[in-house]
Image (spheres, grey):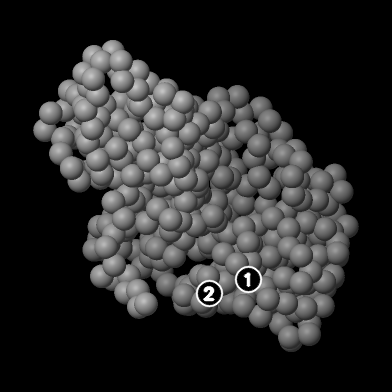
Amino acid sequence: MDFNFTTFPPRPAWTEIDLGRLRRNLQLIRRDLPAIVKLLAVVKDEAYGHGALDVARIALEEGASFLGLSTLEEAMVLREAGITAPLLLLGQRQEAELPWCVEHDLTVCVNEVGTVRALARAAAARGKRVPVHVKIHTGMSRFGVRWDQARPLLELICSERSLLLEGAMTHFAQSDEADKTFAHLQTARFDEVMRGLAESGARVRYQHLCNSGGFLDLPQAHRDMVRVGILMFGIFPSGFCRRIAGLEPVMSVKARIAAIQRLEASEVVGYGMGYTAPAPRRIAVLPIGYGDGFPRVRNQGCALLHGQRAPLLGGVTMDSLIVDITDIPQAQMWDEAVLLGRQGHEEITVHDLAKLKHSVSYDVLTSWRLRLPRQGVNRAAKPAHTHTGSEQIEEAAIAK
């Protein structure tokens, strides 16, 4: 059987990614930053569910200098697609991954002695001098060398002829809260390490501390580069952060009505008979469920149809959910419903779904399953600033 996905009938449920909004968001973020501060666009986990390749390409066109990823596989997908820009692998690498990183010019974040020595051997074996970024643990207690134990690791990196200490980083545990006390403490600890490095006569090209919350609220910590993830997609990391006017959500989730039923009074809906009609109702089935990433809730939430809110009835199932369209008489088969995003004057936000899920916006964005097709729209928007991957590498080589 020959599947041609260009002509294959599309599933009547999908995520929609407005690439024009993404581009505009990046332009506003870049405009908000001092020109000397570089932008690292975090595109891990399929760019928070938005599609890593599309997002990477647009981020680079809009002036990003680095792309941040979590796994070797994520990085190799971009390299295979022709992305030549600097890719920073966050987290910790297994030794077996390091030759791949060297071969494909992936910048490794190093946290401990074993990785440094293994990476130096892999680089020397290929006759390369590879850049590394050292992660300083300043209080988050995840990856990184402790701030009060960092100097030996930094000295080791500097002593390895096949390695170049290009960057030093840390990660804020609480940059998006109103109380910035701990973020200030982390900054002070990081600065202590950097002073010691300077006293030894060494330097790094990139100091980077800020995630999206830090970029918004801690300008004194911007340093040489900021790492922006969720903010690119028009989602502020919390309600406490400074706002940038004009940022808009990039992702919507939509489905078409696949069935319409009528209920008489006292009739029930769904598994467990989770809803009983108090009076005659008209209901619609949307072919999307918790198997696609929608929260598994009962009698909570809504969809938008014809610009009106249609309440969810009964329990969300693996492949479908049911909404009440009694007050939307114009709703018909295959009409478009919105489960995340805007329709008319109404909007369902990622924070609305996060409340249903008893989780956070990051979880909602990254939980949509791959069986739910992803459609990019508004691709035709022109970049305000084109900065290709090859130019970035050339620029970095000159600086080194």
Image quadrant in which the N terminus is located: bottom left
Q: Secondary structure at mark 1?
A: strand
Q: Compared with residue 370, is residue 213 higher up or lower down, i.e. above or below?
A: above
In the image, taking residue 373 as reference, residue 73 lies left or right, namely right
Position of residue 97 relative to residue 191, above or below, is below
Res. 189 visible in picture: no
Tally the numbered discs. Answer: 2
What is the three-letter code of the residue carrying label 2? Answer: Arg
Regarding residue 221, the answer to whether it shows in the image is yes
Q: Are marks 2 and 1 in contact (CB under 8 Å)?
A: yes
Task: In the displayed orientation, state which residue is furthest to the top.
Answer: 278
Q: Nearer the viewer, mark 2 or mark 1?
A: 2
- Residue name at image x 74 percent, y 49 percent: 143
Mark identifier at residue 206: none
Tag 2, which secondary structure? helix
Measuring 76% from the left and 65% from the top, which residue is drawn there?
94
Q: Residue at x 64, y 40 (%)?
A: 172
Against 143, residue 379 (above or below) is below
Q: Alpha-carbon distance for marks 2 and 1? A: 9 Å
Amino acid type indicated by mark 1: Leu
Q: Position of residue 331 (x, y in %)?
A: 15, 35
Q: Quadrant of the C terminus?
A: bottom right
Instruction: Give the number of the disc on residue 79.
Output: 2
Residue at image location 36% in from the left, 68% down from the top: 386
Towards the viewer: 208 or 254: 254
Q: Position of residue 11 (x, y in %)?
A: 31, 55
Badge 1 local density, few (<14 within 10 Å), some, or many (20+)?
many
* Label 2 Cα neighbours within 10 Å, binned few <14 / some 14-19 / many ≥20: some
Residue 216 placement (x, y as % from top left): 49, 38
The residue singled out by tag 1 in the image is: 106
Which comes sooner in the sequence, label 2 or label 1? 2
* Image spot of residue 33 (x, y percent): 45, 48
